[in-house]
Image (cartoon, coloured by chain):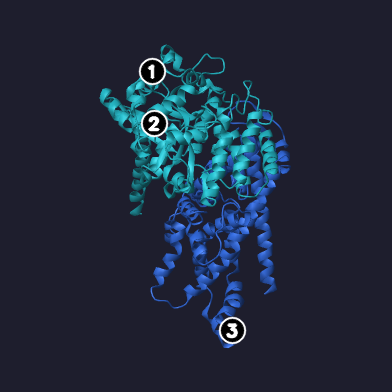
Amino acid sequence: MTVTAKGAARPSPAGLWRYRLDLKASPYLYIAPFFALFAVFGLFPLAFTAWVSTHEWSLLSDEHVFVGLGNYQALLTDPYFWNALANTISILLLATVPQLFAALLLAHLLTMRLRGQTFWRMGMLLPNVASVVAVAVIFSQLFGRDFGLVNWVLESLGAGRIDWQAGTASSHIAIAVMVAWKWTGYNALIYLAAMQAVPKEVYEAAHLDGASRLQQLFQVTVPMIRPTVVFTVIVSTIYGLQIFAEPQLFAGGGANGVTGGASRQFQTLTLYLYEHGFNRGFQFGYASAVAWTMFAVIVLVALLNYVFIRRIRSAS
Amino acid sequence: MTRRPTRAAMAVAAAAALVAAGTAACSGGDDDGKITLSVGLFGDFGFGPLYEEYSELHPEIEFEERIAEFADHHTNLTTHLATGSGAADIEAVEVGYISQYTAQPDRFHDLLDLGAGDLEGQWLDWKWQQALSADGESLIGLGTDVGGMAMCYRRDLFEAAGLPVERDEVSALWAGSWDDYVAVGHQYSEATGGDYFFESSGNMFRAMVEQAEQGVYDREDNLVVESNPAIGEAWDLTVEAIEAGMSNRLQAWTPEWNAGFSEGTFATIICPAWMTSYIETNAPDAAGLWDIATVPGGAGNMGGSHLVLPAQGEHAEEAYEFLEWLTAPEQQLKVFESTGNFPSTPELYEDPALTDMSKAYFNDAPVGQIFTDAAQAVEPQYQGPLQGDVLATIGQGLGRIEDGSQSAEEAWSQVVGDLESF
């Protein structure tokens, strides 16, 4: 910069060369650390997992027999895998759909004039700061069969007690509540940030046209912040498909913590992976196959979501 | 420009700090000539005062105790053994998992090499055998406690149900067999209008299996769950008890299970010696309400542990020296006094310090005598490699009957199917 500003002394060829190199190579150097780390801690494990998944590879033995796609074949014919997949998707839907709607409404409320605005906004984030394990332990107690608060309330309202853990639907709801409690506020803040970028004039126009507050939210705001909605849907999907700590702790440990209840009624895909990878046999080969299958499922579901959200836009 | 040096300096300082922290972490424990022995346990083994005592005798030794949940502890240990790092110098192994580890003796320090060979007579025979490798050439662990079984019961609940209260009379109720126990359960349910007789069917099933001559494995490590008649009988009787509504349907070690003790929701629980301390901890207000009778169906062992020295531990000799001291009769007696974990060294079974001991919490039950009798009567049963997992799988089957999601037949066929994948 100094050189061109002065415009007097011409730079030496060596200086010029260095200047060009700096201009061309430096940006890559600056971003290189991330990619180097990603290669070591992201790409390599990914590739290595793929390699392991084609072997009968137990942590307990030093012999690794190549089995090709045998693990995948065994996986796809295991009814417990499909059970885990169905559970995961059910919990995902129960957790994510109400959660994102609630987040949207909360964000909408937060855009209004409130006393102590910062307090409310920060409060939104508090559940997200709590550790997953703490959340899961406390909610498991709330949903306890004999001494849980939820059952106590149900009973005092005249409704019967529910054995939350035993049933398929009830256990999915309990787990979905844990997830929603932790992430609703977070998503609300993301929506809020996006909403603040929507020009005021649009609302004024809508108001003049006689649109109610709620109509404004769904007719004006949502289409305007669509990229953010896509983002939250995809991020929630990725998180939701990998739920582990909540069902694991909900079962209370022991064998049920691995199988997600005695009937595998809330075993998620990650728990299924854990069951094979870190329990009897330590079958890392099979567990790696589960990991890659999960990866494929997540990509697929994220794509489906993306297409789905796009259609919403074009409809409106 | 002026900011550059500062940033560089900061980066250097940060890097230096990281490196310093890293080296500090690596050398931890060995500075100023002290050796820190790490001890990995599942639950409190009552070793706290013994560490202090040992450190007084050996000022150069310090201890670091790591406690994990039961199942996690064993999972972690297996992982650490396989990956060759992360295990504590001394690790506890419960009896349900010991065969899994004796199958890979090279992952542990051979205690026979370290001087345990002369001590064989100190332990109950079968306790010693359990920690021997299959070829009998190496020993991976020394025994801590054994779990000779008794039956704990609530005096107040028995009285309310019109059943006898004194421990001899209660023992007589089911002296014949487990059928008698279930018959008493029917009586109890009728008298109380359906209160729970025991906490979990899995424990009842396990107790019956532990008493049998053969368990879930034969001596060639084949699963015999389907062919062993003792298992079928235990299953059927347990199912009868479940269907009569006797089970509180609590899963052991869950918060609900803990709460069950303090709320007094069930009347009996199978009581290996180590269970007494769980009852005391979980129901501190129920002192005097619990008592201890004999278990139906004869003697049997449930639980108990060994302490092993993973080969990756660097302080084999120091750790072994401590281990030998810790599992000696004198120390086992101290552990029994403080926690109720029953010694595995028969020398103590003649010692009045042990046999005369009673526990005020259990209405002054002579726990020393009760558990001595129980331990001496135990006929050792062969434990196969995945013993713990097999019993857990069957326990889950019973759980599915308990929560109503399956019939007894469906549950059994799923158990059989699950076991095939082992």
3D distance between C-alphas at marks 2 and 3: 79 Å
Q: Which chain carries label 1?
A: B
Q: Are marks 1 and 2 on the same chain?
A: yes
Q: The cyan chain is which one?
A: B
Relative image position of residue A256 (x, y in whole percent): 57, 44
Residue A255 image point, x, y percent: 56, 41
- Tag 2 subunit: B
Residue on which the image places disc 2: B367
Quarter of the rendering occupied by the C terminus of chain B: top right
Residue located 57% across and 88% down the image: A208
Identify which amino acid the numbered label 3 is placed on. Ala
Q: Residue B165 carries which label?
A: none
- Give the residue number, with chain letter if any, for mark 1: B347
The image quadrant of residue B237 is top right
The amino acid at mark 2 is Val
Q: What crowding class fits label 1: few (fewer than 14 Cα within 10 Å), some (14-19), or many (20 or more)? A: few
The tint chain A carries is blue
> Quarter of the image holding residue B56?
top left
Q: Where does residue B226 sit, x and y in percent of width and height?
A: 68, 31
Mark 3 or mark 1, whichever is nearer to me: 1
What's the residue at 56%, 41% (across, down)? B201
Q: Mark 3 points at which residue?
A: A211
Element at label 3 = loop
Question: Alpha carbon of mark 3 to alpha carbon of mark 1: how far?
Answer: 89 Å
- The image position of residue B164, as x and y in percent, is 46, 40
- N-terminal-most mark, 1 or 2: 1
